[in-house]
Amino acid sequence: MPFDDKDSSMNNPIIADAIKNQMELHGYRQTKRKPSLLVSYKVFYDDLRFQDLCSPR
């Protein structure tokens, strides 16, 4: 799995554990045999601007 130069391998286990913990809280369990769900993520290091469609402008 290729990673950007900015992506620190130190962050990956922290993020993976956080995702696993949240999924378990929602009743999912991790399995390597015949998984039925794939979770992926991307880390953005630059500032991002999001527009909230529900709040007044």
Image (cartoon, helix red, strand yellow):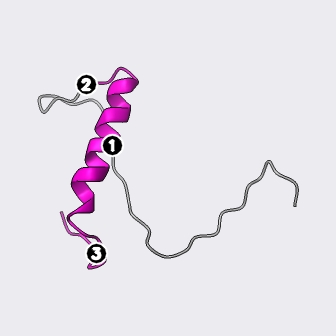
Q: Is residue 38 among the parts visible in the rendering?
A: no
* Label at residue 29: 2
Highlighted magenta segment, given as a residue range: 1-28
- Foreground pick, 1 / 54: 54
What is the spatial separation of the Cα atoms under label 1 and label 3, in whole angstroms? 21 Å
In which image quadrant can residue 57 be found? bottom right
Label 3 sits on residue: 4
Depth check: give the residue in front, 33 or 41.
41
The residue that mark 1 highlights is 18
Sooner in the amino-acid sequence: mark 1 or mark 3: 3
**Residue 19, image quadrant:** top left
Q: Examine the rendered structure and indicate whether residue 56 appears above or below residue 25.
A: below
**Amino acid type at image mark 2:** Arg
**10 or 51, which lies in front?**
10
Q: Nearer the viewer, mark 1 or mark 3?
A: 1
Residue 1 % position (x, y): 18, 62
* Residue 41 left/right relative to 9: right
Q: Residues within 10 Å of mark 1 (few under 14, many from 20)?
A: few
- Residue farthest to the right, as pictured: 56
Judged left or right of residue 42, residue 53 is right
Whether residue 13 sits left or right of residue 26 in the image: it is left
